[in-house]
Image: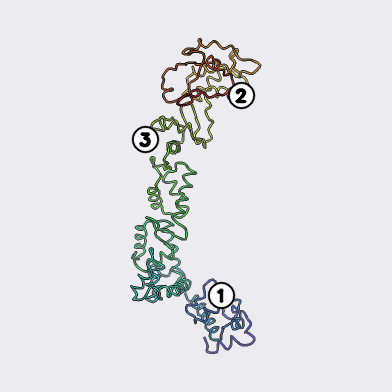
Amino acid sequence: MTTDWWEAMTAPERADAPIRDLVDGLDDIGAQPIPYGRLPTRAHTVYSADLTTWTDLAGETITSLLNRPKGGVATVRAVIACAQDAVAKARAVPSTGSSDAASAAAQLLNRLTEHDRTILSARLWAIQPQTSEEVGRALGASGASVLRRQPKVERRFAELLADPAHRDVLAHAKQLNRLLGPLVREQTINTTLRDLGIHPSSQAALLLLHVAGPYARRKDWLEDTSADGLATASATLEAALARLGAPTTAALVEELGHIGMRPDSVVDFVESRQGLRRFGDKWVRWGTSAADKAEAVLHVSETPASADLITAAIGENYHPRAVREALFGDHRFARATRRTWALRQWGLDEYAGVFGEIAKRIDAAGGTTSVAAVVSDMKARFPDIAEVSVRTYLAAPGFIVEDGLVRRRTADDGWPPVPPLHAARGAFRNGDNEIRVSFAVTSDLMRGSGQPIHAAVATALGMNPGDQRVFTGSLASILH
């Protein structure tokens, strides 16, 4: 640069030319921040509020800079000289990849004073930052002086990081982030840094981890705070469980891999989560209620299962009756057959009971179908229903069977004659206001299944087809 460069640049014919026309190559470094830390204090006072990058400066002129309050020739000259120097350095910098991670970090650190490196490594780069008083004691200074000095030190570091001479630091930090992911154990970080030739507790390690993340401790993990690592991983895992039901380990590795997590970190993360249970290689949410656990078991099975099988899979000393009550009482479940249950979200046809299933087949056939077809289809579709049960329900008052065909009873058909109460086995009157009915104690009765009553009993109670009424006793509902 010649000694008369300033005189040439401030000639009348160039005073109002944009700075980009005066400094060749300024647009090439436009995104870089203006390094006010290397300029006179007045430059920061006068220009830093709205001129933060070289692009901001490029449209200004010598005249506009001089006309700002407190803007002087010496200050403007220093700014222009700094711009020319920044362009020259950018053009002289070799291509990215010319140095390894350790060397790149060391080159940047060497441009900081030991005092500034101490503040940055303890306050800005540290995984667990120290207090200003702790740093002050290490430097033989007060905590207040550390706080006063820190903003200037951080600005100096930001300027160095933006300097093209240190572009390799950014490249290695980006690669380090890809190697670590958004959530990782400290041991993995230490191993990765050693593989790069960097001691995990060194200032170079802290510098690269800060630029790569920054990484900070969250519970037992280190997370990339710029990606909100722990929260993002937790949300991604929950979404995968909700969508897939019972994903395999490989599926979860793929799902969390989409946010950049390492496979080993994914497995470690899933295994460490509370409220999950592993069945073989499948993972499910393991809630506290019988219904939550039954839902998880069905997700794992991916096929309808009986209450007994679900209870056995749950373990934990659950009783089949508690599981059966949960299945009946929660909308998440739907009966698939007489004894098996499915998740409603599967969209399977819900079992409607023997009577209801017969009625559905009659309706699907247009109102009339053959008894043989109903029996054959019901046996095939519901193997846990006995043929005798199907034929018993076909003979119920709700249907009319004629010449091997069955249809629904209509109002025009009327209600068939009902025998007197004493004709129903196990039913008898006990005075004028009490009817007693005996039931055989079977496994169905013991597990709480509904029990049909004879039409004579219903008629004696004043109930006709289509009526609904609940009869209660001292302990619970008796009939409904």
Circle 1 Cα neighbour tier, 10 Å, few/some/many (<14 / 14–19 / ≥20): some
Tell me what residue is drawn at x 35 percent, y 34 percent. Answer: 317
> Circle 3 sits on which residue?
315
> Dot 2: within a 10 Å radius of its alpha carbon, few (fewer than 14), some, or many (20 or more) residues?
some
Query: Is residue 20 depicted above or below 228 in this figure?
Result: below
Which element type, helix, strand or loop, lies under badge 3? Answer: loop
Q: The residue under label 2 is which amino acid type?
A: Asp
* Outermost residue to the front: 432
Badge 2 or badge 1: first in the primary sequence: 1
Badges 1 and 3: C-beta atoms under 8 Å apart?
no
> Can you tell which of label 1 and label 3 is closer to the viewer?
3
- Badge nearest the viewer, 3 or 2: 3
Task: Looking at the image, tell me whether mark 3 or mark 2 is earlier in sequence order.
Answer: 3
Q: CA distance from mark 1 to mark 3?
A: 68 Å
Residue displayed at 42% across by 56% down: 183
Q: Earlier in the sequence, mark 1 or mark 3?
A: 1
Residue 394 locus on image (x, y percent): 55, 17
Mark 2 = which residue? 363
Q: Which mark is residue 51?
A: 1
- Quadrant in the picture for residue 438: top left
Q: Nearer the viewer, residue 49 or 369?
A: 49
User: Looking at the rendered structure, which numbered label has been put on residue 219?
Assistant: none
Between 90 and 98, the residue placed more toward the observer is 90
In this view of the protein, which residue sits in the foreground, 132 or 164?
132
> Gap in Å between the C-alphas at discs 3 and 2?
42 Å
Asked if the residue at tag 1 contacts the one at tag 2, i.e. Cβ–Cβ closer than 8 Å, the answer is no
- Considering only vertical position in the picture, is 5 above or below 480? below
Name the element at disc 2: helix
> Height in image: 128 above or below 260?
below
- Foreground of the two, 283 or 420: 420
Name the residue type under label 3.
Gly
